[in-house]
Image (cartoon, rainbow, N blue to C red):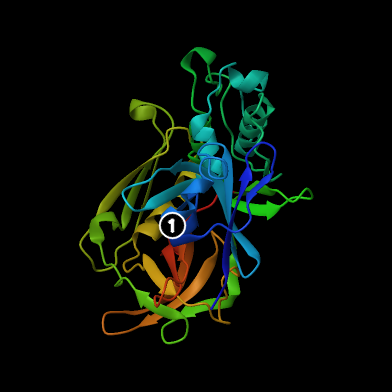
Amino acid sequence: MPAYRYQTHHALTGELLAADLLLSDVEFGLSLNATGDFSGTLAPRFAHLLPAQLDPGNTLLTAERDGTLLWGGIIWRAQPEGPAYPIEAAGWGSYLHRRHDVHGSLGGRGPYTYADPCQVIRDVWAYAQSQPDGHVGVTVDATASRAKAGTPAEPYSTEWWEAPVLGEVVDDMTQIDGGPQWTEATDWTATGRPGGRIRLGWPRLGTRRTDISFTSGVNVATTVPVSYDADEYAQVVIALGAGEGRSRRRAVDAIRNGRLRLEHVLEVPTEKANDRLAARARAERTARQLLGEVTEIQVLDHPAAPIGSWQIGDDIRVSLHDQWSDYDGWCRITAWTLRPPQGNDPEHITLTLARADRFTYGN
């Protein structure tokens, strides 16, 4: 049975506060373009640890499995509820949702015109951690992209009188057409404190993996039945680009495949190039012609795909064969949740999936 260990550190100094926190009912995980989360329960007899070692908003929490650091973040809530003492934490990115731009343009780093969104994300973290008592030990990947934030007509800016939430600036960058993707990681620093890392990926996060797989009867324990939903289905995509009225750019990509005609309108108001608009329409039509999707599986720690061998954003071959499913295809991991063993209940690892061919990437 794997051994789990949970530690707490002071968020500013990195001082070790609790070397082996005894928690039950633990669940934690990571997501694509979102902060990770953690929940657990402290036994009432250890309530004396509060607030010195579990001070919400001032304490880092880490989770290790057999000596491997899997998760890190900040404790935001530790409050008794009857006989229970639940603890809630969130990943490093949650810190930016408690911080605001109080100087404007991220302290003079903007406004941004044709800026790389990856650089804007780095600037957000640099600004947040440059303020007094604001450094939590987070680094951001040096990834570069060819996506653009802001134009000469409409620069991307943040105004001090609006006090924008820094986390929402990061969200803006990931929502730009062809923008980067991110997730979190945690490592031990040279000083022995946990350090957060924002993993940036462009044109995508993760990669297609041929060395690991998930298969019924091998390392898949349970699965949500394959979903067949035509709400998003279409053989005809009408892409609308830049411009207004009769001068608006338009591209239509359509096929006939013996099914009832279904259409979808794709709004791309910033696209001025006809060839790129047509490529977007084609990619969207291809993605929308897919029926049958696996949204969630519960997997086992197995040599076919050991825990820690896969990452957020990876494409992995999934083969499911049971009384409800007969599926074989590439799926992308968009989130994972791990529940350690509890009493007679074994370890549970749940993966949230999406069809890999539903995703299109910038270039």
Q: Residue at x 63, y 34 (%)?
A: 125
The residue nearer to you, when weighing 118 against 267, is 118
Q: Give the image location of residue 46, x and y in percent.
A: 49, 53
Give the image quarter of residue 122: top right
Three-letter code for the amino acid on which mark 1 is drawn: Ala
The residue nearer to you, when weighing 173 against 79, is 79
Q: Give the image location of residue 112, x and y in percent.
A: 61, 24
Residue annotated with mark 1: 43
Q: Residue at x 31, y 71 (%)?
A: 226
Furthest-right residue in this view: 190
The residue nearer to you, when weighing 245 against 115, is 115
Q: Say whether residue 60 is left or right of residue 26.
A: right
Q: Give the image location of residue 262, x and y in percent.
A: 24, 55
Give the image quarter of residue 282: bottom left
Looking at the picture, does residue 53 appear above or below residue 105?
below
Q: Give the image location of residue 206, x and y in percent.
A: 59, 59
Q: Residue at x 66, y 36 (%)?
A: 12
**Dot 1, how many residues are within 10 Å of its Cα: few (below 14), some (14-19), or many (20+)?**
some
Furthest-left residue in this view: 260
Q: Residue at x 57, y 24 (%)?
A: 151
The residue nearer to you, when weighing 49 against 311, is 49
> Is residue 248 at all visible to an observer of this figure?
yes
